[in-house]
Image (spheres, rainbow, N blue to C red):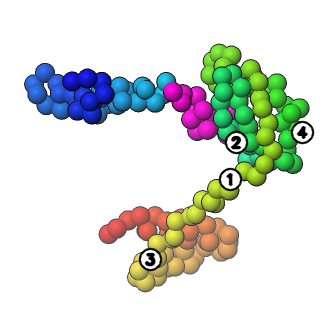
């Protein structure tokens, strides 16, 4: 089988069974990683950790060409990024453990809007459990403590399926 043959991707172990996926994935991904690189994907995934939450909300790594990183930056923050470029470069290179990026190219423009994280709906408790919770907390005089204990009790009882 040649390298261009799609059947070449299917590999068997010495007993004639399929190899584990973890053993074959690196070979399948290697050509893609050579052409596009994994550095930008790594930067995107860890961007808030690298530059901090405040700067991460105002920027997004857009393209990596050689040792130049193009950043998409909110127009109101471009001057801040220009001023902090040496510090940002140092943080990026510390993340990679080597001098991987030598220059930042700032492009002002709107950042993609991410949907806010939605909280899961609170499960409702059956009436008999709600009544038991009210009975358990009715002797507490402090209203804030009582409300906190009721919230805690609701969360615990909601997890318990019994």
Query: In this view of the protein, which residue sits in the foreground, 87 or 154?
Result: 87
What mark, if any, has residue 158 been given in the picture? Answer: none
- Closer to the eye: label 4 or 3: 4
Residue ID for mark 3: 125
**Residue 49 on the magenta segment:** yes
Q: Which residues are magenta?
A: 35-52
In the displayed structure, 162 sits above or below 99; it is below
Contact, CB < 8 Å: mark 1 with mark 2?
Answer: yes
Q: Which residue is mark 1?
A: 112
Mark 4 and mark 3: Cα distance apart in space: 52 Å
Q: Distance between the Cα atoms at labels 1 and 4?
A: 20 Å
Residue furthest toward the left?
15
Residue at 56% over, 68% down: 151
Is 142 left or right of 118, judged from the image as shown? Answer: right
Judge whether 61 appears above or below 162 on screen.
above
Asked which secondary structure carries label 2, the reply is strand
Q: Residue at x 51, y 70 (%)?
A: 121
Q: Are marks 2 and 4 in contact (CB under 8 Å)?
A: no
Disc 2 or 3, which lies upstream in sequence? Answer: 2
Viewer-proximal residue among 28 and 42: 28
For mark 2, what is the residue? Answer: 60
Callout 1 secondary element: loop
Which of marks 3 and 4 precedes in the sequence? 4
């Amino acid at each position: 089988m040649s390298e261009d043959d799609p059947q070449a991707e299917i590999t068997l172990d010495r007993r004639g069974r399929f190899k584990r996926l973890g053993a074959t994935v690196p070979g399948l991904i290697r050509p893609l990683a050579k052409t596009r690189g994994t550095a930008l994907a790594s930067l995107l995934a860890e961007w808030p950790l690298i530059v901090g939450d405040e700067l991460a909300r105002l920027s997004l790594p857009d393209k990596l060409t050689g040792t130049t990183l193009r950043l998409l930056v909110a127009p109101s923050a471009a001057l801040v990024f220009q001023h902090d470029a040496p510090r940002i470069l140092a943080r990026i290179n510390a993340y990679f453990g080597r001098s991987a990026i030598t220059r930042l190219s700032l492009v002002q423009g709107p950042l993609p809007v991410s949907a806010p994280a939605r909280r899961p709906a609170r499960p409702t408790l059956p009436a008999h459990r709600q009544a038991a919770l009210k009975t358990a907390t009715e002797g507490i005089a402090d209203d804030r403590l009582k409300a906190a204990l009721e919230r805690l009790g609701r969360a615990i009882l909601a997890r318990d399926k019994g």
